Amino acid sequence: MKDDNQWPVEFDKFFNSINSGSDTYIGSHNPLDHMKRIVTIIICFLTVLSTQGQHIVIPQNLKIPLDSAQKVQLSSSLNSFISDGGEQVSTTFMILPGTERETGLLINEMKGMGKNAQLKDDQFYKPYLTNITDLGKNTYGLQISYMGVLNGAPVVHASFKLLTQFKAIGFNFYSPLKENTGGWKTKVLGSITYHYKDTLSMTDAKAYRERIALYDKKLNAPTGPMDVYYCDNFTEAQQIAGIDYKQDYNGIAWNELAKADGGKLLVVNGWNSYKVRFDTHDLFHERLRLVVKASVINRPVDEGCAYLYGGSWGVYKWPDILALFKKYADENLNTDWLSIYLNEKNKNFVGGNTPLKISYAINALIARRYDKAHGVAPMPLLTCGKVEKGDENYFKVLESISGINKANFNTEVWRLIRE
């Protein structure tokens, strides 16, 4: 138990009151109330003891609008919430029922925020409770900041805002997304519910729906219900979702956040509100992950299919990528495609701020041939598993669906380029 965390002090008060026979800490002379408080705090104590990972730091000078027992429960619940890491979002008692998707999205953004990759320290940045506000009706606004000291200077790695409701045995946490967009308008088009502030471009909304329908057809997937929140930029998207600041997103103006739960998808769209409302490349990745688990997806194949169906960087369409790759091939006639694929998967054939990778282009060509024959994306190859040394799983599946193997890889890649 850490000295800078307030809850050990509360436990000391509690146990001292038990030993002294006093019920000033318990707060009631009613034996039943007395017993309820004892049971509650024992539950909190056991919960904290079973918690793994980081513990929330509650500064001693922080004003907390709770009684002593509630403070203990809040600290215990926060420790469990942070340590749970959202792995069981849909079933954990800590998530307010009915908010699983938006809260799961926020938890995903909080994962790994203690890590400092350079120092190889997974708990370098400590989570601090930096603010708590009583909003009435047993509801409180919280701010949690991940901070550390680097080279003698304090660093804020990330800061999040979330809401919590007090229940009999603890606190339930949830994202402020719905509260932050309470005055927004909605419009339903097919299976998509659009949420927006003032006006909705029907041209953009229809294009988005049509692109989703195309990808779902290529993936043999049903188009499930979606909620899409249209923001003006990525900064606003983060704010309404509960991300006050995240160092990873420094300088990123356009992007989106997404979370699937129970076949339903939540998208907080922060793309350019006056130019591009969605990225066709990233949208393919998003739809694929609604169909299969990320753990079985082969990234070079996934990226290749996204090249084929959605272009890249919002700059290149597939014909542009194909032309550039053919140009590279013509200028490098002695290229050993197999060696590059096995040993240099990150090698580019276009550099600069919008690079294009050789391994992705090769898989785009393979996917193009498969699509011509079957009318769908090469799901067996997409789901052959993560990249491994030697790519044995990849080549085993590749040969089964196309006849291409390591022995004829160079010949077949040239044939794909010339098709």
Image: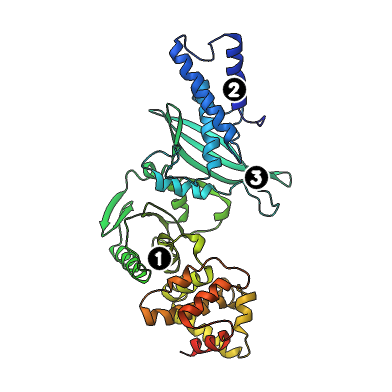
User: Vertically, is 318 above or below 50?
Assistant: below
* Mark 1, residue position: 276
Residue 78 x %, y %: 53, 35
The answer to whether any part of residue 207 appears in the image is: yes
For marks 2 and 3, the one nearer the N-term is 2
Q: Are marks 2 and 3 in contact (CB under 8 Å)?
A: no
Q: Name the one closer to the observer, 84 or 248.
A: 84
- The structure residue drawn at horizontal position 65% and vertical position 75%, both measured from the top left corner, is 343
Could you tell whether 298 is left or right of 266 in the image? right
Location of mark 3 (residue): 123
Task: Give the secondary structure at mark 1.
Answer: loop
Q: Mark 2 points at which residue?
A: 11
Q: Can residue 357 be seen in this view?
A: no
Give the mark nearest the N terminus, 3 or 1: 3
Q: How far apart are marks 3 and 1 (CA)?
A: 38 Å
Q: State which tag comes first along the sequence, 1 or 2.
A: 2
Determine whether, in the image, residue 332 is placed left or right of residue 26. Answer: right
Determine whether, in the image, residue 2 is placed left or right of residue 233: right
